[in-house]
């Protein structure tokens, strides 16, 4: 008799645990447990992006499990597998690079956990491995930078020599910004890209690579195109240390639109920045709600952005939230 009672109690306990989503993974109450893996903290943009995500995915509605990949794909894959093991409700992540995600995303799909991509896209064999992607149009950002260069160079004879500071090798923004820039700049035969190298989206590496460009090319650089503002700011330091005037001797356009870029434009050291809005948190939170509820969501959500130049910097600077 005692054995029968124990068995019934065990069944009741199991049923109660199952009804609560297994306890650990589901989080407290009715909150949505989200596993979020961030690229790292390589720039002002990324810091603002992380802050926006954390503010939007806050208790009591959300139970956020956050992981910083420190710009390493192996760390990010480990984090995603940890989220799967914990049985989170939704996984969101900003991938370090575009490729190499099929296996871990198949594991998430097999576990019934929907995945939302933020900021950066992936290249996978099966697009059903993720539910939706929210982020900027990186190709268009590259095109906008190139259009600014062409407009800024109106009436100037060629050759106009450009150096390019690329982002992290293999990342979606680096690949796409380079593609968009070359697509437009290639329509005008005055322009030639004489050097192109990764500065890994950081100030320190941007400065280091720009120093190498200046050593190789001397004063024969007309334009710098940087895939993000932080690298441009590092490059500005290298240009000044070489005895040249950034923004005058070398015209500079970069991407992101962070406060530091507006400060550099106000000081006359940066000529233009193409906006890439990091404040994706509220839109991401709504997509997670919809995905978790089983509602249909768009495959691609694009953030609206603009281009800012030196003459707009002083007026716009107080409005920058990142």
Image (spheres, rainbow, N blue to C red):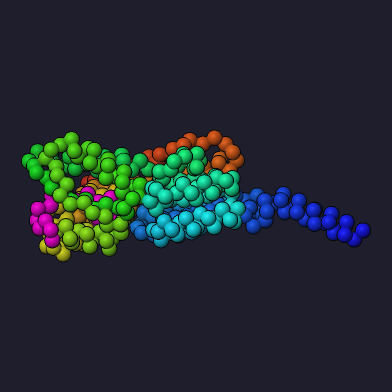
Is residue 124 positioned above or below 243 on the image? Answer: above
Q: Which residues are magenta?
A: 215-233
Q: Residue furthest left?
A: 157
Q: Position of residue 187 (x, y in %)?
A: 18, 35
Of residues 96 and 251, the one drawn nearer to the viewer in this rendering: 96
Residue 200 appears in the picture as rendered: yes
Is residue 44 positioned above or below 141 on the image? Answer: below
Locate the N terminus by quadrant: bottom right
Q: Position of residue 144 (x, y in %)?
A: 26, 40
Q: Position of residue 262 (x, y in %)?
A: 28, 52
Q: Position of residue 156 (x, y in %)?
A: 9, 41
Give me the residue at 16% from left, 57% from top.
213
Please check the rendered image and state whether residue 221 is part of the magenta-colored stretch, yes or no: yes
Give me the residue at 58% from left, 56% from top.
85
When asked about the image quadrant of residue 6, the answer is bottom right
Give me the residue at 31% from left, 48% from top.
174
């Amino acid at each position: 008799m005692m054995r029968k009672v124990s068995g019934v109690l065990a069944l009741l306990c199991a049923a109660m645990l199952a009804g609560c989503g297994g306890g650990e993974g589901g989080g407290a109450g009715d909150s949505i447990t989200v596993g979020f893996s961030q690229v790292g903290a390589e720039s002002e943009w990324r810091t603002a992006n992380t802050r926006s995500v954390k503010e939007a995915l806050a208790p009591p509605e959300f139970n956020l499990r956050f992981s910083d990949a420190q710009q390493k794909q192996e760390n990010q894959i480990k984090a995603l597998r940890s989220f799967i093991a914990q049985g989170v409700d939704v996984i969101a992540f900003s991938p370090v690079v575009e490729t190499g995600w099929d296996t871990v995303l198949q594991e998430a799909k097999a576990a019934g956990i929907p995945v939302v991509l933020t900021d950066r896209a992936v290249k996978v064999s099966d697009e059903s491995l993720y539910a939706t992607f929210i982020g900027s149009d990186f190709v268009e950002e590259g095109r906008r930078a190139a259009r600014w260069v062409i407009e800024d160079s109106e009436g100037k004879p060629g050759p106009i020599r450009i150096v390019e500071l690329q982002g992290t090798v293999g990342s979606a923004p680096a690949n796409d910004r380079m593609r968009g820039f070359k697509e437009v700049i290639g329509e005008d035969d005055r322009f030639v890209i004489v050097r192109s190298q990764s500065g890994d989206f950081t100030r320190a590496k941007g400065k280091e690579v720009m120093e190498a460009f200046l050593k190789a090319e001397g004063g024969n650089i007309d334009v710098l195109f940087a895939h993000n503002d932080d690298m441009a700011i590092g490059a500005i330091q290298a240009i000044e240390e070489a005895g040249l005037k950034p923004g005058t001797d070398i015209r500079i356009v970069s991407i992101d639109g962070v406060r530091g870029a507006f400060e550099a434009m106000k000081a006359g050291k940066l000529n233009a920045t193409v906006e890439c809005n990091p404040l994706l948190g509220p839109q991401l939170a709504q997509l997670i709600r919809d995905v978790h509820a089983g509602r249909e969501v768009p495959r691609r959500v694009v953030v609206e952005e603009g281009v800012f130049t030196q003459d707009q910097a002083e007026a716009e600077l107080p409005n920058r939230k990142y």
